Image (spheres, rainbow, N blue to C red):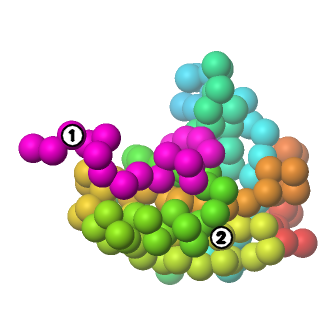
Amino acid sequence: MSDPSDLPDLGDVVERLDHVAFGVADVARGAEFVHLMGGRFFDGADSPVADFRWAQFAMPGGGKIELIAPLSPDSFVATFLDRRGEGIHHITLKVRDLDEAVARAESAGQRVVGHARLHRNWAEAFLHPSTALGAVVQLAEWDDSLPGGSSDWEALLRGEVVEGT
């Protein structure tokens, strides 16, 4: 077996492990568990383009947990829940250059799916679980200085916070 440090990597493209996302049927119910673990809500929105609601929680000591829930029965999150039930959906690595990260991942034999720019401040691609140790790994590029969703928890639950508006 070769030394892994001899293999190409994404080390200088990855900025950080940003969050772990859980697929849940209901963000409010999922938030109870995250709060128990010390998480504090700070950002979220409905994403009509991808048909899901997301909510992020800052965790003690750093890092984030994200909850994703379907907005309709046709959502990819609904499909995930039907197949697997609630649980970890993906981990997200923030990258400085998505195209470079994708090119390197593919050259290392990773199966990359869903490479897209969804709006002005969000581009993503996914490493397929078949080549990523059984996990969905999201590679995402965005500008931290631009607003994402809203810190108004009640407005989020009422469906009043929509990405891109």
Q: Position of residue 118 (x, y in %)?
A: 68, 77
Residue at (43% x, 56% y) in the render: 137
Three-letter amino acid code at disc 1?
Asp
Residue 32 bears which disc, if any? none
Residue bearing the label numbered 2: 123
**Was residue 11 drawn as part of the magenta stretch in this picture?**
yes
Q: Residues within 10 Å of mark 1 (few under 14, many from 20)?
A: few
Residue at (66% x, 77% y) in the render: 117
The mark that comes first in sequence, 2 or 1, is: 1
Q: Nearer the viewer, residue 163 or 155?
A: 163
Residue at (40% x, 47% y) in the render: 87
Secondary structure category for the residue under label 2? strand
* Residue 124 visible in the shown view: no
Q: Nearer the viewer, residue 127 or 163?
A: 127
Secondary structure category for the residue under label 1? loop
**Considering the image in quadrants, where does the C terminus appear?**
bottom right
Q: Which of the two marks, 2 or 1, is nearer to us in this view?
A: 1
Residue at (55% x, 41% y) in the render: 17
Q: Are marks 2 and 1 in contact (CB under 8 Å)?
A: no
Report the magenta residues as a range: 1-29
Three-letter amino acid code at disc 2?
Ala
Marks 2/1: CA distance? 32 Å
Residue bearing the label numbered 1: 3
In the displayed structure, does residue 138 sit left or right of residue 16?
A: left
Vertical placement of 90 versus 20: above or below?
below
Vertical placement of 155 versus 163: above or below?
above
